[in-house]
Every structure is written in C-alpha cells, then in structure tokens.
C-alpha cells in the first residue's frame, strides 16, 4: 500500500515536505525563506498570504541602528517596559541580533523611509531614543510583507498553500512529545490532508479576535496556541494581553489603529473637557508604556462625560500629516474625520499577546520538532508589557534562530504513515451549534472580564463558562473552519482566565482590581499551563 493509499484509508490525502511553517506574517515568511536554504518548505495559511497582523503594522520596527543609540539602551527600555518579567537573555539576543537581521531585510528588498538619504527613525512609547524604522510612512508591515513574498514567489523551494486550516498537530505513534506533522483542511480541494514534516514552525500570530474590540484582523484567533496546547506544549504568560491605547472610537463598527508613532511625533491626548491628562499620570506623558496610557484613558473616561478621549494633532503641519501618516489620514478621512482639523475620538483595544507557546532562545518548544516564533511564541522578550515596535524585530530574530537550530540538528527522520497517530477526522460540514452567538458572547466576556482591568469573580465566571462551552464541542457531528476557530478561541479565553486568576498581583498589562499592586514574590514567576499538568509556577533562570 502506498502512503497515499494508507492516508486515504484515514479519509485524508497525504503529503510531505522537509519543513512546515504555519502563518504568513513576518516571522513565518522569514522562517520560510531561511529554511528554504536547507530543504523544501510548505507554508500553510488559513486564509490568504496578506491576512496577518504584520500586514497592518503601522509604526515600524524598533532597532538600534542610529549612531546615537546602542543595543544596551534598547535592552534597558525593553526590560523597563516589561515590568520585571522579561527574560534578560532573550532580550539581549533580540537587541544584539536585531540590527543584522534588519540590515538583511533591507538587502532582501524592504525600503525604509529616509530623509536626505539617511534612515528616518521615529519614536514610540517608553523608548529613550528615536529608533523605529518605518516604510511607506505608516505602512511598514505591508511593505515588509510585500518584499518577503516577492522573494518567495520566485523561490522553487517554498510553496504557500492558502485556505489551508491546520486542525491539529500530529504526534508520532507511541510518543507524547514528538511532532511529525499536521492535519490540515484544504478548503480549495475540499479535503483533509495529513502533512508530514521533520519540523513544524508555528508562526500563526496572536489572539486579538478573542476580544470584542481589537486592532487585529479577523484571522487573529490564536489557533497556534490552541493546537500546541492540545498536543501537549507548554503555554506561558497568557494573562498578559496588551491593549493599544489609541484606536478609533467606532461602536459596533470596525476598529482602526492610530499608531503610537503619531504620539511619538507629538500628538496630545485630551479628556472629555479638552484637557491634556497624561502628564499627571507619568513622566513620559503620552509616551508612557502602553499599559499605563491605556489605564489612564479608562480612568479619564470613567470620570468624564464621553465614552472616549481625543487624540489631537491639529498643531502639526497639515502637509506633514498627509505625507507621514498616509494610511491613517486616508482611512480616517474615509470614515468622516479630518485629523488636520479636528480631534479624533479614541479608546484602547486588544492589540498584542505577550504570552504564548513557551520557547527557548532558539524557538524550540518542549515538543520535539515543534518550534514557534512571532506573536504565537513566548520567547520571554516582552515580559508583562511589550515595548512598542519590538514585535516585528522579534519575528525576524527568532525566525532566524529557528533556522539555525534546525540546520544544526541535521537529522531528518522519515516516518511511515502508521508511525503517525491517527488524528480524529470528522466529516466536514455545518455544525448544529450556534457558533455565532457563542463567539460574540466570548468576545464580550473577554472584554469585560479579562480586559484592561480584571478581578477574580469575573475571571472565575469566564473560566467556568468557557470550560462548559468547550465541552459542547467534543460530540459535534460535523466540523468546519468556524467551529475549529471558535474552539481555539474558547481555549485561549480559558487559558487567559486561568492564568489571570493565578497571578494575584498587578503587573504590566495584567491589572487586578482586587490585587492592584505588584508583589515582589511574583517578579520572576511565570505561569506555565500544559494539557496534563496545569498551574505550574516556574522561576525564571
Ligand atoms: C503602532 O504603530 O502603534 C503599533 C506598533 C506596535 O504595536 O508595535
């Protein structure tokens, strides 16, 4: 019997490549390009190549390339923003290796904005230097994605498979810690595929869609963390979700990010009485760390008479606004706001997940052959609060380190189909569960009970509710992408609630109303959850 016949017997097709990369943001594309030097790469994305958080990254990529800057200063800022919880070794790697990877990105075709021929650095919250490179004004992520996919398109060794939803990771038979492939639903061919590889790289992004109000595109449902958790991976720091302070106030409609670099260039935040308020909260005023600005905004809203605050750039040169922030200017104009002439109403929205699949400094997880990089991973560089624009850099640096680790490993094993654990393959079709209503309820509950401010009562209710909803999924007859996504989202809500209950203090982006201060006993403690052994507390080395 051929491998394909064997797979067919399991109601799936069979395919194989040296490496699988899941996700098409900066981390996934850069990992794929690097890995293609040593083997064949299949990149899987559940929608289309451009559907990722990277595509929407406005502000830029933080890197100490300016002569007035240094990796030491970048490291200090990153660790300060991380509120005591960063892994200092991982941060050092990020800031020391970052410049070389960014130079490489430029060689690969990304053109960052320049003034008079020199790279133009902007500033963002909690950075002591102007060190954020940007491209196309405020279209940095899109430009990076385009330059990387242009190269991939010309590459014979990389295949991007769109509309391929990874349902689950596949373990080797008889092993509970060796990943040998993935089970995929190919929505174009309308069939399941068992795809074997000697390494699987998760680069599938973050969890913004788990919240009702988010800057993230609708693909950001954190599938990577959920499938890794189900396979036995360690998941850590899930209580830390960053809210971006300034997104357009648009109740019931689409949220839209107003980049921190707008504040970096001098924008002012005003409360409902028109008064500038940030100087009374932090010495860095509008450029304080994000968690501080987001909570200050909530406080002003609670004491004001409007459900938002304003961001004001009317003191900027109008031509500068149009040229420096073309995406923001045009999008706001389309939605009826002229930022040259009027203050723009803003509120915080869920933006970035600091936690994720726990990795070492080479992107390795506790499961053999499973690696993670980008937002889905927790390398430890962000601690309790990510420093603005560090995430694109993290994607590059750790994708490259995964390539180094895999290259050094050399051994590539081939398995027979019977060596693979048979995944549970249910018939594809519309489930009888009311998925839409559960999804909306989850997003509301996450916003209200696991948002910028939390307490034990709300978190426990969220934990119980998500657990009960997850149980409904075990005996559904039919499955499809909506069901898999929702199951993954509920898993994330559950892990976030569980971790937030356990951390009985406030630190960085995790603010407990019932424990409003940091507790020094928690400063080196991470909560690590695994399917079989939850509630493990780990002291950082
Ligand atoms: C922004 O442009 O404000 C987003 C940058 C980031 O989240 O790092």
Image (cartoon, rainbow, N blue to C red):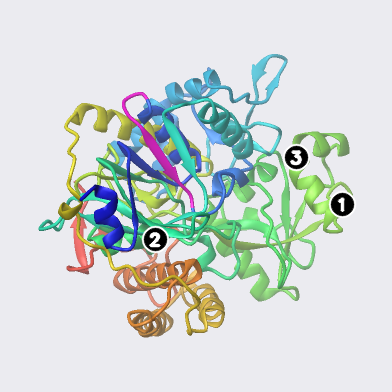
Q: Where is residue 414 drawn, in percent x and y?
A: 19, 40
Question: Which residue: 84% across, 47% down?
Answer: 314
Give SS at disc 3: loop
Q: Give the range drawn in magenta.
A: 37-45
Which callout, 1 or 2, points at the residue further toward the start of the chain? Answer: 1
Question: Which residue: 32% across, 31% down?
Answer: 403
**Is residue 277 among what the camera can see?**
no
Q: Where is residue 356 drawn, in percent x and y?
A: 36, 55
Q: Along the horizontal axis of the image, is 316 left or right of 59?
A: right
Pointer 3 residue: 325
Pointer 2 residue: 507
Q: Where is residue 114 drawn, in percent x and y?
A: 68, 21
Residues at badges 1 and 2 in contact (C-beta under 8 Å)?
no
Pointer 1 residue: 338
Question: Which residue: 72% across, 71% down?
Answer: 251
Which callout, 3 or 1, points at the residue further toward the start of the chain? Answer: 3
**Is residue 330 among what the camera can see?**
yes
Q: Which of the two residues, 466 or 483, is positioned nearer the viewer here?
A: 483
Give SS at disc 1: loop
Residue 324 among those drawn in magenta: no
């Amino acid at each position: 019997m051929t491998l394909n016949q064997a797979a067919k017997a399991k109601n799936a097709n069979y395919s194989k490549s040296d490496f699988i990369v899941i996700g098409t943001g900066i981390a996934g594309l850069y990992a794929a390009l690097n890995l293609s030097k040593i083997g064949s790469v299949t990149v899987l994305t559940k929608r289309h190549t451009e559907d990722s958080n990277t595509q929407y990254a406005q502000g830029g990529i933080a890197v100490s390339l300016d002569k007035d800057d240094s990796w030491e200063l970048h490291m200090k800022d990153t660790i300060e923003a991380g509120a005591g919880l960063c892994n200092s070794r991982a941060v050092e790697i990020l800031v020391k290796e970052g410049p070389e990877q960014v130079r490489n990105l430029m060689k690969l075709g990304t053109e960052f904005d320049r003034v008079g021929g020199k790279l133009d650095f902007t500033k963002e919250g909690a950075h002591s230097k102007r060190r954020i490179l940007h491209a196309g004004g405020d279209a940095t992520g899109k430009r990076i994605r385009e330059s990387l996919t242009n190269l991939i398109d010309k590459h014979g060794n990389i295949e991007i498979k769109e509309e391929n939803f990874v349902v689950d990771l596949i373990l080797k038979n008889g092993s509970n810690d060796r990943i040998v492939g993935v089970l995929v639903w190919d929505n174009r061919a309308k069939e399941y595929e068992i795809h074997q590889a000697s390494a699987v790289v998760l680069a599938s992004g973050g969890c913004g869609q788990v919240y009702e109000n988010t800057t993230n595109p609708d693909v950001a449902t954190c599938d990577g963390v959920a499938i890794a958790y189900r396979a036995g991976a360690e998941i850590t720091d899930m209580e830390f979700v960053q809210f971006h302070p300034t997104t357009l106030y648009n109740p019931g409609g689409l949220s839209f990010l107003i980049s921190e670099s707008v504040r970096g260039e001098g924008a002012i935040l005003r409360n409902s009485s028109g008064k500038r308020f940030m100087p009374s909260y932090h010495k860095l005023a509008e450029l304080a760390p994000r968690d501080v600005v987001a909570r200050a905004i909530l406080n002003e809203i609670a004491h004001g008479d409007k459900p938002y605050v304003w961001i004001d750039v009317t003191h900027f040169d109008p031509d500068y606004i149009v040229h420096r922030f073309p995406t923001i200017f045009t999008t706001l104009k389309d939605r009826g706001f002229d930022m040259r002439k009027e203050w723009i109403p803003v509120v915080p929205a869920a933006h970035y997940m600091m936690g994720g699949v726990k990795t070492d400094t080479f992107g390795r997880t506790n499961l053999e052959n499973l690696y993670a990089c980008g937002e889905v991973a927790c390398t430890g560089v962000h601690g309790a609060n990510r420093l603005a624009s560090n995430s694109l850099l993290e994607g590059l640096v750790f994708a490259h380190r995964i390539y180094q680790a895999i290259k050094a490993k050399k051994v590539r094993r081939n398995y027979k189909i019977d060596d693979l654990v048979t995944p549970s393959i249910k018939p594809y079709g519309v489930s009888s569960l009311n998925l839409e209503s559960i999804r909306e309820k989850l997003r509301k509950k996450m916003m209200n009970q696991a948002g910028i401010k939390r307490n034990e009562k709300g978190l426990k209710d969220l934990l119980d509710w998500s657990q009960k909803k997850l149980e409904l999924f075990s005996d559904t007859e039919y499955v499809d992408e909506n069901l898999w996504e929702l199951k993954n989202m509920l898993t994330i809500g559950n892990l976030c609630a569980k971790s937030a209950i356990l951390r009985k203090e406030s630190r960085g982006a995790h603010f407990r109303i019932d424990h409003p201060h940091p507790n020094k006993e928690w400063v080196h403690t991470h909560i690590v959850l695994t399917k079989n052994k939850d509630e493990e507390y780990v002291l950082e080395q």
